[in-house]
Image (tube, rainbow, N blue to C red):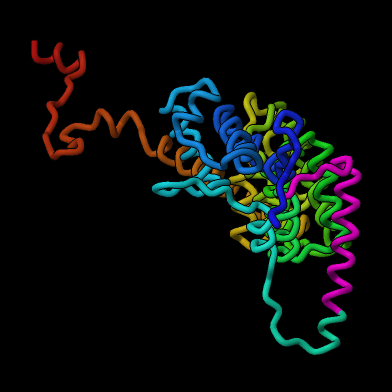
């Protein structure tokens, strides 16, 4: 007995996986989407045979465009093109294989702990899906969330805040923004919600310092200026009091710069000056030394002037510099006697 499908092709349906609609279709060209849908229709109904010429005629495009579309679909692993046939790949099985991880032998305690962790993660993923995607989160996001959990070790609460950050910046159209934020948090050692709170406190403090520097210097901070402020805080470990002290050195300057302030702070850092008291003591000592040197220089200049007399300049037979003997200057009296 042979079972036949008696439904008319006019009113038949062609099922397409949601994986294709949500993850693949936005990345494909229009011809590739039409070709994929037509291939699925041929597979579900009719003889299940179609040539490139058939595709070109039915879709109203050239055979060259069909070849480009098939190549595009194959690169996306939606189909496999052979010498004599075209196979439509099972997207659900591919997704299952990507998500499957072989489980090695574990103790019962480890298994229970892993199940509890996964349960918490599953709950927060569902909450993310309903809060930010209205229950329509694509499978690409699920893959990224799984990877961020495994690679960065984020707590579920941190993962939710990550999506809240992306939503606040209107950047949920793709994973790029969230990925960069996740990398920044991970590089700062953020794993738990408490660590994230401390990170944001430090982050906000740096932003306030950047605004303060721009206000004191009366300038719009550039990207390089902001990196300098990050260095003052993260590398040098200086707070607002010491940075204010360095900014005070630009008082009276017509065009104060971040570069000058950075040079001052680097000098203090290289001399291992960590507190405001140490810095002020160093600056007072330095000012005293400069004042003493200036006083000594002025004294030497006055002594040189006193050593120069009219007699020494007009003295007969004096040698000047090179040992050349200068002629004697005769006075008017000497001239009269000679007459």
In the image, is 200 to the left or to the right of 254?
right
Residue placed most toward the observer, 294 or 210: 210
Residue extending farthest to the left is 339
> Which SS type dominates the magenta stretch?
helix
In the image, is 215 to the left or to the right of 76?
right
Residue placed most toward the observer, 291 or 106: 106
Q: Give coordinates of residue 201: x percent, y percent.
A: 85, 52
Q: Is residue 315 visible?
A: yes
Residue 22: in magenta span: no
Q: Tell me where the magenta segment starts and ends, as one range.
A: 113-139
- Identify the residue at horizontal 49%, vertical 38% (top origin): 70
Q: Give coordinates of residue 96: x percent, y percent.
A: 69, 61
Quadrant for the N terminus in the image? bottom right
In the image, is 154 to the left or to the right of 325?
right
Quadrant for the C terminus in the image? top left
Q: Is residue 245 visible?
A: no
- Identify the residue at horizontal 57%, vertical 46% (top origin): 78
Q: Give coordinates of residue 51: x percent, y percent.
A: 46, 36
Q: Give coordinates of residue 59: x percent, y percent.
A: 55, 24
Is residue 154 depicted above or below 300 in this figure? below
Is residue 334 depicted above or below 117 in this figure? above
Residue extending farthest to the bottom is 107
In the image, is 212 to the left or to the right of 338?
right
Residue placed most toward the observer, 91 or 257: 91
Residue 135: in magenta span: yes
């Amino acid at each position: 007995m042979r079972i036949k499908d008696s439904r008319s092709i006019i009113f038949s349906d062609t099922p397409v996986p949601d994986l294709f609609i949500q993850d693949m279709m936005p990345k494909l060209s229009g011809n590739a989407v039409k070709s994929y849908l037509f291939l699925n229709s041929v597979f579900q109904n009719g003889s299940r045979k179609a040539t490139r010429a058939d595709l070109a005629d039915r879709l109203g495009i050239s055979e060259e465009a069909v070849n480009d579309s098939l190549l595009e679909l194959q690169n996306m692993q939606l189909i496999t093109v052979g010498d004599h046939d075209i196979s439509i790949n099972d997207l659900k099985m591919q997704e299952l294989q990507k998500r499957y991880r072989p489980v090695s032998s574990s103790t019962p305690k480890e298994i229970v702990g892993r199940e509890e962790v996964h349960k918490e993660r599953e709950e927060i993923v569902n909450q993310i899906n309903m809060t930010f995607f209205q229950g329509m989160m694509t499978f690409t996001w699920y893959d990224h969330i799984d990877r961020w959990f495994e690679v960065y070790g984020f707590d579920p609460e941190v993962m939710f805040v990550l999506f809240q950050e992306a939503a606040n910046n209107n950047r949920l159209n793709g994973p790029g923004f969230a990925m960069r934020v996740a990398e920044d948090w991970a590089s700062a050692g953020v794993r738990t919600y408490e660590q994230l709170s401390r990170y944001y406190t430090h982050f906000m403090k740096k932003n306030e310092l950047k605004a303060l520097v721009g206000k004191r210097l009366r300038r719009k901070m550039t990207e390089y200026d902001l990196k300098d402020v990050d260095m003052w805080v993260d590398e040098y470990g200086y707070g607002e009091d010491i940075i204010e002290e360095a900014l005070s050195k630009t008082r009276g300057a017509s065009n104060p710069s971040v570069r000058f302030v950075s040079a001052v702070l680097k000098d203090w850092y290289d001399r291992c000056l960590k507190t405001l008291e140490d810095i002020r003591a160093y600056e007072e000592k330095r000012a005293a030394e400069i004042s003493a040197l200036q006083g000594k220089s002025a004294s030497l200049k006055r002594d040189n002037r006193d050593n120069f007399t009219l007699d020494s300049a007009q003295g007969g037979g004096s040698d000047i510099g090179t040992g050349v003997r200068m002629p004697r200057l005769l006075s008017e009296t000497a001239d009269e006697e000679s007459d």
